[in-house]
Image (spheres, rainbow, N blue to C red):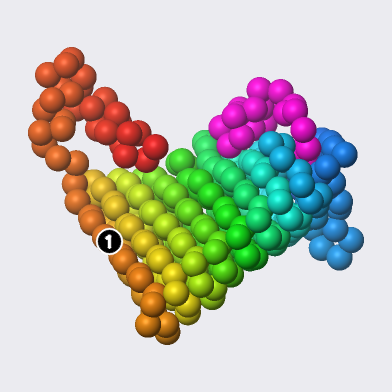
Amino acid sequence: MDEIQKKLLKEVAELDALPVGAYNIRSNGKSAARNTTADIDIVTKTDKPGIDIIVKPGTKHQSVHIPVIISESGLKESVYNDFYIGEDCDVTIVAGCGISNCGGEDSRHDGIHSFFVKKGSHVRYIEKHYGEGTGSGKRLMNPTTVVELEEGASMDMETSQIGGINDTYRVTRATLKENSALTIHDKILTDGDQHAKAEMTVAMNGNGGTTDLISRGVAKGNSVQEVMIGIDGNAACHGHAECDSIIMDHGVIVATPQLKATNVDAELIHEAAIGKIAGDQLNKLMTMGLSEQEAEEMIIRGFLQ
């Protein structure tokens, strides 16, 4: 890998070298490195671009890294990755995509990830998106995440767009069965003329299910963010959704809650707030020697953590 590719890998997966455990690193439309373990297999799909990640039942305290990096201007791809998590597992999956575009053509990555999590298993999923480059070509990302949690399964998702993406359409759809649990913390930073649209929908179909969906966004410059969070309570369940956003300059943020209950014992809550950075926060940091810009950047970093 060249220095640009190494930097992208560091940004989206915090990797300075090949990770321990199972991994598949995709670079400019091809698999650049792969490793499997006794408990985790990675198989190339034969019918379309992508891989199957198969975690054997009982696998505990292991990780899978599947980052994607693009440094070729004009490259456009759709990749389908399916995760099959056996019963009684506890694994961490690190994904993410970085695009560096220094040319005049648009570069785009559409990643479709589907998770099938068996009974009693827990998955921690981390996905970061990042863009950079001096060219006039755009950096486009459209991630789709589909989650199916069986009885007693749980998943914690930490997803973020940390800057440099011109346009994105982020879709997350989940189905929960009895006593399963899903937590999503989604963070988006936009600037300039960037546009981000995010949709999260969860169908809670089993008694005892819980979900906690938290969206945080910062819109700077002339950027636009649209966020929709929907929860369907179809059983005796508990669902919580929260949209919390900071608007700066001439940014625009649209937050839309959608709650639907078809069961008398479904408890659904939504909270939403959009506002600017508080003046007292800025003043306090500036009295400590920070410039106004430095103070704003520190507040934003803390907000998006």
* Position in image of residue 68 (x %, y %): 68, 43
Q: For mark 1, what is the residue?
A: 271
Residue 123 seen from this side: yes
Seen at 67% across and 43% down, the residue is 91
Where in the figure is residue 57, as x and y percent of width and height?
79, 51
Q: Residue at x 57, y 69 (%)?
A: 178
Left or right, residue 301 beside residue 43: left
- Residue at (36% x, 61% y) in the render: 241
Q: Is residue 74 above or below residue 281?
A: below
Where 90 sits versus 171, above or below?
above
- Residue that protrudes farthest toward the top in the picture: 289
200 and 78: which is toward the camera = 200
Q: Residue drawn 32% across and 39% down?
A: 303
> How many numbered callouts?
1
Q: Which residues are magenta?
A: 1-27
The answer to whether residue 129 is magenta is: no
Residue type pointed to by label 1: Glu
Q: Quadrant of the C terminus?
A: top left
Image-quadrant location for residue 39: top right
